[in-house]
Image (cartoon, rainbow, N blue to C red):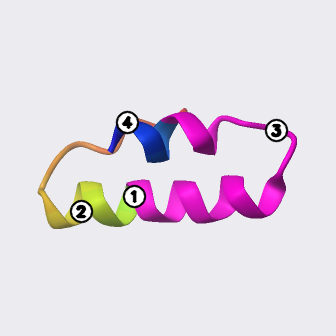
């Protein structure tokens, strides 16, 4: 989960950022964890 969160903060690869943020949000939802907006 931390890997998705950290990679979503990167600014040099927008496709990676988008996919990471999506996976972070999806995993947070599935695990019923709070979504922390970066």
Name the residue at 59% across, 41% down. Answer: 7
Q: Earlier in the sequence, mark 3 or mark 1?
A: 3
Q: Nearer the viewer, residue 23 or 33?
A: 23
Location of residue 4 in the rendering, given as x and y in whole percent from the top left corner: 47, 47
Query: Residue at 39% of width from left, 58% of height from top?
Result: 25
Q: Earlier in the sequence, mark 3 or mark 4?
A: 4
Q: Residue furthest right?
A: 12
Mark toward the start of the polypeptide (4 vs 1)? 4
Secondary structure beneath dot 3 equals: loop
Q: Which mark is residue 12?
A: none
- Residue at mark 2 to residue at mark 4: CA–CA distance: 15 Å
- Between tags 4 and 1, which lies in front? 4
Helix, strand or loop for disc 4: helix
Relative to 16, say whether 4 is above or below.
Answer: above
Image quadrant assignment for residue 3: top left
Q: CA distance from mark 2 to mark 3?
A: 24 Å
Residue 26 appears left or right of 17:
left
Packing grade of label 3 (10 A; few <14, some 14-19, many >=20) is few
Residue 29 circle label: 2
Q: Label 3: which residue?
A: 11
Q: Which residue is drawn at the image coordinates 77% and 64% (left, top)?
A: 15
Picture coordinates of residue 10, whole percent (x, y)? 72, 36
Residue 12 within the segment the image draws in magenta: yes
In the rendered image, residue 19 lying in the magenta stretch gets the answer yes
Nearest to N terminus: mark 2 or mark 3: 3
- Write down the region rendered in magenta: 6-24
């Amino acid at each position: 989960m931390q890997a998705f969160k950290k990679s979503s903060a990167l600014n040099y690869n927008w496709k990676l950022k988008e996919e990471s943020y999506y996976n972070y949000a999806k995993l947070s939802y599935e695990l019923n964890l709070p979504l922390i907006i970066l």
